[in-house]
Amino acid sequence: MPILWPGALVLAACVFDAPSASAFPADTLLDVGGRALEIEVRRGREPLTIVFEAGGGSTLDSWDAVPDSVAVRSGATVVTYNRAGLGRSDLGPPGLTPLDEMRDLARSLETLGVPARRIVVGTSYGAMLAVLHAGLYPDDVAGLVLVDPMNARFIAATGDFVKSTAPVPENPANDRERLIVRMSRTLDDLAARTGAVEPDLPIPIVVIAAGEPWWGRAEIVAAWRRSHAEIAAARAERELVVAEGSGHQVAEDRPDVIVDAVLKISRMALDD
């Protein structure tokens, strides 16, 4: 694995014919327009890449053991990364948008030389980015797994509720707070873009819904679950799976449900 950012340390290279549970991912810093983007790659033998999008303020570590398990069982190349402002990834300019980030990610995947055909797995806010990614690159994205997803349908049904649950710092003191400000400022545009794209995406999608209510208000819980059911029912290629016993942190509570869904979509992509 080449070092693609001056001075970056590749912690471990794992180019192999068959994934191994003991193989470490290659941790690389890539130059995207003069800033660093931290990406971990587990290289596989199949002509398929699986990209994981973490939740809004979460790092790639929030997926726990899911990427390792998917790499071992699927044979695909698995990519996790930290979006701008998380982990070792630079925050970038104040005007950076989710659209910019998805384009930076796509260019990074090309730089890494991973298979172009890919599945995107997104949880919570990251699920909206997965939908945006699929809309931008329809020839490359073969399927989605949306894990207890934040989505345009829910935002439209609940008005200002989403923004009210994540107070925005008036005077952000660090990169994490600046990231929250930027996410809040770009949320409406992201919802509009994904709301326009999601209903007609002609690819397999598995929607994983938390089995346990976690919002705390009955009407919000109902809207959350209804939005997931509506996404899954919008096209015949979609499926709703309930992660029984799990709250919003499905990767922690029921990683097996995510792994099974990703493997199902992967098999479909490889058989296509």
Image (cartoon, rainbow, N blue to C red):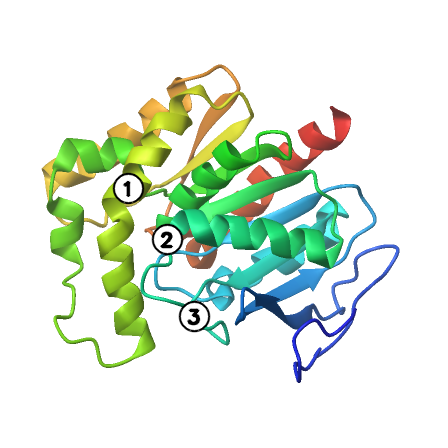
| Mark nearer the N terminus (2 vs 3) | 3
Residue 27 found in image quarter: bottom right
Residue drawn at x 63%, y 65% as measured from the top left = 40
Q: Mark 2 or mark 3: which is in front?
A: 2
Which kind of residue does numbered mark 1 sit on? Asp
| Image quadrant occupied by the N terminus | bottom right
Furthest toward the top, the residue is 236
Identify the mark at residue 189; answer none if there is no mark. Answer: 1
Name the spot of residue 227 as percent of width and height, x first. Answer: 28, 30
Residue, disc 2: 97
Tell me how far mark 2 sits from mark 3, CA to CA.
Answer: 15 Å
| Mark nearer the N terminus (1 vs 3) | 3
Residue drawn at x 63%, y 57% as measured from the top left = 108
* Viewer-nearest residue: 93 or 161: 93
Name the spot of residue 207 as percent of width and height, x first. Answer: 44, 34
Q: Mark 1 or mark 3: which is in front?
A: 1
Identify the mark at residue 217; answer none if there is no mark. Answer: none
Look at the numbered discs 2 and 1 and tell me whether their residues touch, using CB distance below 8 Å: yes
Decide: is 118 above or below 4.
above
- The reply to whether residue 258 is visible in this rendering is yes
Q: Residues within 10 Å of mark 1 (few under 14, many from 20)?
A: few
Residue drawn at x 70%, y 71% as measured from the top left = 4
Identify the mark at residue 86; answer none if there is no mark. Answer: 3
| Image quadrant occupied by the C terminus | top right
Residue 244 found in image quarter: top left
